[in-house]
Image (spheres, rainbow, N blue to C red):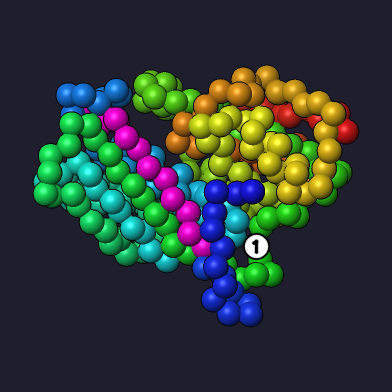
């Protein structure tokens, strides 16, 4: 099941909630990975927005939880605005800051709220005849910063969302490609005896640096042309 919550709004529409967070990543002395706060929150917002948009939702608001300190609120909002800019959206940000006590490590949380028409939900629509691929590479920690050119760009993600040959998109998280693939296959009633990909299937993909995609087999070349060297096919034995 996707890391997204669906709540009924009406007979035709549902509320969509997706979230992500980061801890021990930032500029505090005890942080495990040191990175600018704009970058940290950019990736957290990116994950939550991708999760919501992948199921067909239109984001309508972002909730920011800041456990770093008051003086970083505007910096964090700036990082979230960067994701908005790359996705060509503009939505409000609301949230809260832990200002009573200092923290030894950085931590933030980002929640995205969206809406989707029931008839346009992009889940459980992959047939057994579909093909599968990973777009981008699984990266985590310092590798996200050092190999940023292998992180699937949000501009490409947006193109994939709108491509008529793409059936479902799933952001790959810390549990890896194989976990997300098994979930996607189970959701669609597809039983695979085995699967293979040139990428490490169990490696963490951290802040959704890669995407799992199912697509119409006759359009594989079109997908390859669009994503170029970000394309890694998955071979299934059914």
Q: Which residue is drawn at 56% across and 41% down?
A: 171
Q: Quadrant of residue 69?
A: top left
Q: Is residue 66 left or right of residue 4?
A: left
- In magenta segment, residue 17: yes
- Tell me where residue 12 appears, x and y as whole percent: 63, 77
Rendered location of residue 142, percent (x, y):
37, 21
Residue visible at 50% across and 49% down in the picture: 50
**Residue placed most toward the observer, 201 or 146:** 201
Q: Where is residue 83 in the image (x, y as percent from the top left)?
A: 38, 48
Tell whether position 190 is magenta: no
Q: How many labels does the image show?
A: 1
Q: Is residue 14 above or below residue 94?
A: below
Residue at image position (60%, 56%) is 55
Q: Is mark 1 on a helix, strand or loop?
A: loop
Residue furthest front as drawn: 101
Horizontal placement of 81 versus 59: left or right?
left
The range drawn in magenta is: 16-27
Instruction: Return the x and y of residue 65 as percentages of the image width and height.
Output: 28, 51
Which residue in the structure is indicated by mark 1?
121
Q: Nearer the viewer, residue 149 or 98?
A: 98
Mark 1 nearby-residue class (10 Å; few <14, some 14–19, many ≥20): some
Q: Is residue 149 visible?
A: no
Q: Quadrant of the C terminus?
A: top right
């Amino acid at each position: 099941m996707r890391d997204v919550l669906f709540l009924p709004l009406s007979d035709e529409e549902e509320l969509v909630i997706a979230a992500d967070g980061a801890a021990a990543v930032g500029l505090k002395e005890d942080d495990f990975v040191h990175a600018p706060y704009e970058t940290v929150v950019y990736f957290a917002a990116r994950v939550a927005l991708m999760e919501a948009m992948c199921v067909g939702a239109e984001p309508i608001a972002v909730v920011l939880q800041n456990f770093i300190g008051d003086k970083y609120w505007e910096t964090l909002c700036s990082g979230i605005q960067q994701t908005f800019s790359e996705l060509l959206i503009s939505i409000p940000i609301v949230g809260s800051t832990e200002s009573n006590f200092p923290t030894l490590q950085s931590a933030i949380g980002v929640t995205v709220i969206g809406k989707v028409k029931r008839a346009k939900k992009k889940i459980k629509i992959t047939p057994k005849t579909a093909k599968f691929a990973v777009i981008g590479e699984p990266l985590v920690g310092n590798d996200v910063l050092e190999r940023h050119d292998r992180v699937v760009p949000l501009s490409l993600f947006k193109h994939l969302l709108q491509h008529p040959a793409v059936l479902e998109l799933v952001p790959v998280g810390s549990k890896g490609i194989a976990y997300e693939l098994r979930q996607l296959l189970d959701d669609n009633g597809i039983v695979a005896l085995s699967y293979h990909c040139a990428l490490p299937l169990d490696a963490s993909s951290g802040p959704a640096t890669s995407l799992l995609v199912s697509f119409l087999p006759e359009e594989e070349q079109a997908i390859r042309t669009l994503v170029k060297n970000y394309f890694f096919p998955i071979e299934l034995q059914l």
